[in-house]
Image (cartoon, grey):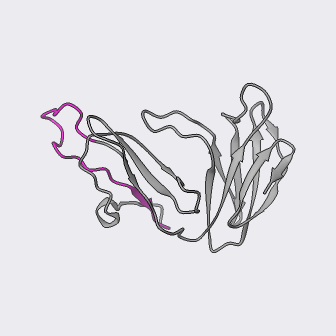
Amino acid sequence: MVKGNVAQMPDFAGLDPDNPLVQGVDGVFQEVGDRAAVASMQVGRGGAVVDFNLDGALDLVAVNRWEGVEIWRQERALGNWVQVALHQPGANRDAIGAVLEVRRDGGVERREVTVGGHAGGQLGWRHIGLGEAEAVEVRVIWPGSVDGAWMRLEAGGFYDVTPEGFVA
């Protein structure tokens, strides 16, 4: 969470640090900004979790008001991963509105492809953490509700996915 008291409003905290939330296996979220050393006291307006240097480790960026952007680089990936970029022909070449499905452990996770967000939108590679898994099954429901085929993606790869399939 990137946040901050924008106009020194007296009814709100004067210093309100950024604070990542991490979900435990029990489904409960915990604040970890202090332990991760990213509890910035700047007046945050937006942020993103993204792999800036394409090493598989997710980095953090916070866009601040009245101050510069802050970037925290994670030095190593915490487990296996794949990254997926979606491309289709036509005006919506980045497939905004598509749904990326990830099948594993007997269930399916779904992520809608969006760009928005106040001062924190992002477009590009979609990171999928795999933990200890060596591969994962992924498919795309393309805008217009066209279901793509399930694809097996090996850990550590960058996959450019089109409605016809993928290129590693």
Q: Measured from the top left, where is residue 66 in percent x and y?
A: 26, 34
In reply to whether residue 23 is colored magenta, the answer given is yes
Query: Image point 62% across, 50% down: which residue?
Result: 126
Instruction: Please determine whether, in this image, residue 112 is positioned above or below residue 166.
Output: above
Q: Single out the residue that lies furthest toward the bottom.
A: 132
- For this view, does 101 lie left or right of residue 47? right
Q: Measured from the top left, where is residue 56 in percent x and y?
A: 58, 62
Please name the predominant secondary structure of the magenta segment in the image.
loop
In reply to whether residue 112 is colored magenta, the answer given is no
Q: Bounds of the magenta span?
A: 4-25
For the C terminus, the quadrant is: bottom right
Query: Image point 34% across, 62% down: which residue?
Result: 32
Q: Single out the residue that lies furthest toward the top.
A: 91
Q: Measured from the top left, where is residue 109 in percent x and y?
A: 65, 54
Instruction: Depth check: give the residue in front, 69 or 149.
Output: 69
Q: Single out the residue that lies furthest toward the right.
A: 164
Instruction: Please determine whether, in this image, residue 105 is positioned above or below residue 83.
Output: below
Query: Image point 54% across, 68% down: which residue?
Result: 77
Q: Quadrant of residue 47?
A: top left
Q: Quadrant of residue 106?
A: bottom right
Instruction: Please determine whether, in this image, residue 15 is positioned above or below residue 58.
Output: above
